[in-house]
Amino acid sequence: MDKLLISGGAQLQGSVSASGAKNAALPILAATLLASAPVTLTNVPRLRDITTTLELLRRLGADLSRENAADGSTQIVAQPTPLTNFAAPYELVKTMRASILVLGPLVARYGKADVSLPGGCAIGARPVTVHLDGLRALGANISVDGGYIRARAERLRGTRLVMEMVSVTGTENLLMAAALAQGETVIENAAREPEIVDLAEFLTTLGAKISGAGTAQIQIQGVNQLGGGTHRVMPDRIETGTFLVAAAMTGGRVRVTQTCPDCLDAVLRKLRDAGAVITTGADWIELDMQGQRPRAVDIHTAPHPAFPTDMQAQFCALNAIADGVGTVTEAIFENRFMHVPELQRMGADIRVEGNIAICRGIKQLTAAPVMATDLRASAGLVLAGLVAKGETLIDRVYHLDRGYDNIEAKLRGLGAQIQRVK
């Protein structure tokens, strides 16, 4: 099993480009099931979750080809082909919750789907009831039997959907399903993440009629058929934020290119509060810490456009070595402080009370063997290793490979001493 070995102490300097966004690429790949003409996707990141999704789509009978682009990303071409299977099996779905995103497209286009109840990172309960209730309201017959969601429908019918809770994947699934439903669908209390806007833009390229994506109310006028087209996946805002926090923690100066500054307002605001000097351009962000130790910041996770839960572990690591005391309130997932005991092994002074982590910063962490427990926790441990005295060995980095495209090579390009070992 691969591990990461990090020698801490290097001040990060230089430029790094952001990869395509995992959380945009996964629903867009699922949405290729709706297309009746060839689709080309560019800027797709090279990640374990992408590979899992491609395997799942091929298992359904999709015709997908994958090739490496000159910029190191992946280009994927989907050819329209009749599906031969409508079941998403447990052995694939259990490794990645986003597999449930094939449910909406399969029911909308083919009228049937058998999708295993999902697995993924154990960061807390993420109920699928939002997906199921929405599809029922669109006219699908839904049952849960033997660990599988079984959905059937002649043709979905547009309706007004009021989501009980804000759900990103729920919004995405219902948006894809409504694209081929008969009549108009309005999704109320929709998630507003930039990745949903990217999905809507992709569907619009195929011929869907969508307005309001990025707001709490999305309107979809169903069409009979979607065509094909070419779409470039948006940059990964969480990867971007992770590199910026790495620069802040090491007192360095890093520019992230091929990214989206407007997608990171809440994160940039907190980095400025921490003492960073930040400048931005149309597609780049530069953070200069001017060799200073960051100040502790208080954060509170909430749905977009508030502070993203996927950046919480990284800011726990920042607060661990910051000047002062910062509180981190996790309001999205109830089990997302599993990185804290590992940071404590490195000397971090963090106390967890319910859904709040109280971080009293110390000047330097001490290297220790630690274990990654989920995707973003892995990133927090990497950041801690960059500033710890000695050599930090991080186990179970397969979590990291689910969401970061070759992170060790990118960090080495900024001066970090990090390598993958067996």
Image: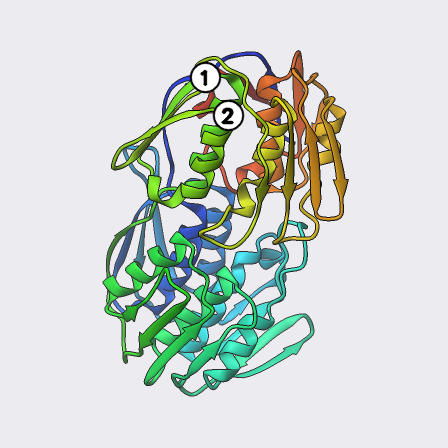
Quadrant in which the N terminus appears: top right
Q: Is residue 155 above or below residue 57?
A: below
Hey, what amino acid is under mark 1?
Gly
Secondary structure beneath dot 2 equals: helix
Q: Are marks 1 and 2 in contact (CB under 8 Å)?
A: yes
Q: Is residue 148 shown left or right of residue 47?
A: right
Hey, what amino acid is under mark 2?
Ala
Q: Is residue 334 shown left or right of residue 80?
A: right
Q: Residue at x 57, y 33 (%)?
A: 297
Residue 110 visible in the snapshot: yes
On the image, which quarter does residue 192 sit in?
Answer: bottom left
Residue 260 visible in the snapshot: no
Q: Is residue 184 above or below residue 304?
A: below
Q: Nearer the viewer, residue 151 or 367?
A: 367
Q: Residue at x 49, y 60 (%)?
A: 168
Q: Is residue 276 above or below residue 311?
A: above
Instruction: Categorize mark 1 by other alpha carbons within 10 Å: few (<14), some (14-19), many (20+).
Output: many
Picture coordinates of residue 15 (x, y %)?
Answer: 35, 22
Residue 252, label in figure: 1
Picture coordinates of residue 16 (x, y %)?
Answer: 37, 26
Picture coordinates of residue 178 (x, y %)?
Answer: 38, 76
Picture coordinates of residue 210 (x, y %)?
Answer: 29, 69
Q: Nearer the viewer, residue 405 or 289?
A: 289
Q: Nearer the viewer, residue 201 or 337?
A: 337
Residue 59, label in figure: none
Residue 246, label in figure: 2
Q: How far apart are the two marked residues, 1 and 2, measured between alpha carbons?
A: 8 Å
